[in-house]
Amino acid sequence: AQSVTQLDSHVSVSEGTPVLLRCNYSSSYSPSLFWYVQHPNKGLQLLLKYTSAATLVKGINGFEAEFKKSETSFHLTKPSAHMSDAAEYFCVVSDWDFGNEKLTFGTGTRLTIIP
Amino acid sequence: GAVVSQHPSRVICKSGTSVKIECRSLDFQATTMFWYRQFPKQSLMLMATSNEGSKATYEQGVEKDKFLINHASLTLSTLTVTSAHPEDSSFYICSSGLSETQYFGPGTRLLVL
């Protein structure tokens, strides 16, 4: 069985400072990992994904994440936060179960940007 | 990336009525679509997997007779909430996969009075 743990339910950073959103996962196989962002009353937008290629993945809006198998982590970072980054972020692991894709969502991290 | 749309974006209905939500893949064909429910300040909960031309697969605890899913074409899946009650009020989101990535619709906010 796979699982995802987002270690912080809420993160606050000042505008212009670095962002770190933490995610740990467990999976029986080689998983695919994703970060999605959700703005209020909106659907989920893909930020980036890891699918067993390069371990450092670059996404949209300056975000990136590093897959560390030894630590079973996939933390999301951004060098400099912008006000528009304020949103809910979900770490997601994808696995295949009897031929069916199964997504497991983390509980989400709410990112607040302080002006 | 691929685009998934939902209609309507929000709907208000009276208790006891039925509501249909559409999920469309706009620029790709979707053999499989997923339906999720999201409560305020919580993560997404998978309700069912919609398969084109066959019956949907429901997650444990989801009433298939209450949440009717139809996937009649490769670009359209519908979720009908039958005899809606206030406890069905929620944010419903669909998704479909392309190139090992799930793309999500913008969601439908359902309020049952």
Image (cartoon, coloured by chain):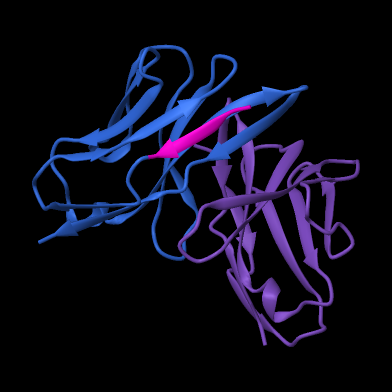
Chain colours: A blue, B purple
Asked if the stretch drawn in magenta spans residue A88, the answer is no
Could you tell me what secondary structure mostly forms the magenta stretch? strand
- Please give left or right for residue A38 compared with residue B12 in the image: left
- Please give left or right for residue B103 compared with residue A98 in the image: left
- Please give left or right for residue A33 compared with residue B11 in the image: left
Q: Quadrant of residue B12?
A: bottom right
The tally of labels here is: 0
- Assign the C terminus of chain B to one quadrant of the image: bottom right
Look at 40% across and 14% down and name the residue there: A69
Image coordinates for residue B95, horizontal then vertical, percent: 62, 46
Image coordinates for residue B92, horizontal then vertical, percent: 63, 61
Q: Nearer the viewer, residue A41 or A67?
A: A67
Look at 69% across and 80% down and name the residue there: B86
Q: Quadrant of residue B111?
A: bottom right
Image coordinates for residue A11, horizontal then vertical, percent: 25, 51
Look at 84% across and 71% down and name the residue there: B82
Does A13 sit above or below residue A76?
below
- Span colored in magenta: A1-6
Q: Nearer the viewer, residue A112 or A22?
A: A22
Q: Nearer the viewer, residue B37 or A63?
A: B37
